[in-house]
Amino acid sequence: GDSVTQMEGPVTLSEEACLTINCTYTATGYPSLFWYVQYPGEGLQLLLKATKADDKGSNKGFEATYRKETTSFHLEKGSVQVSDSAVYFCALDTGRRALTFGSGTRLQVQP
Amino acid sequence: NAGVTQTPKFQVLKTGQSMTLQCAQDMNHEYMSWYRQDPGMGLRLIHYSVGAGITDQGEVPNGYNVSRSTTEDFPLRLLSAAPSQTSVYFCASRTNMDSNYGYTFGSGTRLTVV
């Protein structure tokens, strides 16, 4: 079946450090890939997406590239801020039923 | 405001009680789904629907029922609550026209079963 694997957290960084959160997937067909973010006490918000191989999704300084050859969709940001502290979820949608999520990675950014 | 509305936001149940978590969307989305979020386990799919009158099971359906009599509403019923159902529940929806748009999520229901 479909699955998403994310790096374990928490990830603790100082402000202005570089961020990478790894995400790999297993799916039949050609899924759309997403990163969702959950701020403390809130629901999930769509952060960025990519719908086909080599697409790059970007939003709020975050980027992720759909790599079909390595079945990966790693989240990156060049300079994190305290306000980026949240839980980040990688997810895929094959269009057959619903989203399949990774386990989430908590990011803590210290001033 | 357009979006996904979940009620209640918080609920405490006694073991064995039943209740319904409500989910409504006003975006005319065909696809709707229920997830539970537990620490360290991400979001797990409980049930989903691809349109009115059509529902199917996800990864963790036991102890939950759903129905989809209208496009707008997708309630989740707990038949006989158990402490293992203590969790945060999220409802989500998207259009069936294009999976690329992603799902819109409700703000969640935090359920405690004692």
Image (cartoon, grey):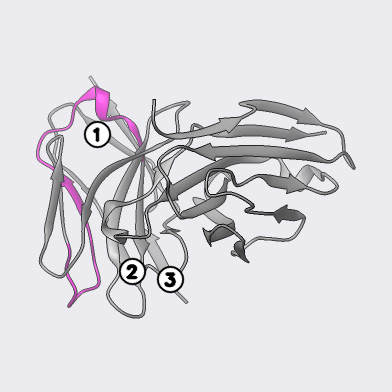
**Is residue B65 one of those drawn in magenta?**
no
The label on residue A96 is 3
Which of these two is toward me, B30 or A4? B30
Which amino acid does the dot numbered 3 rest on?
Arg
For the residues labelled 2 and 3, the Cα–Cα distance comes to 16 Å
Q: Which residue is mark 2?
A: A25
Rendered position, A16 above or below B82: above
Majority secondary structure of magenta residues: loop
The total of numbered circles placed on residues is 3
Q: Are marks 2 and 3 on the same chain?
A: yes
Chain letter of disc 2? Answer: A
* Picture layout, residue B27 above or below residue A110: below
Question: Can you tell which mark lies on residue A13?
Answer: 1
Report the quarter where the C terminus of chain A lies. Answer: top left
Q: Nearer the viewer, mark 2 or mark 3?
A: 3
A78 within the magenta span: yes
Q: Closer to the N terminus: mark 2 or mark 1?
A: 1
Could you say which is closer to the camera, residue B5 or residue A32? B5
Q: Which range of residues does the magenta coloring cover? A: A66-87
Q: Are marks 2 and 1 on the same chain?
A: yes
Q: Residue at x 25, y 72 (%)?
A: A71
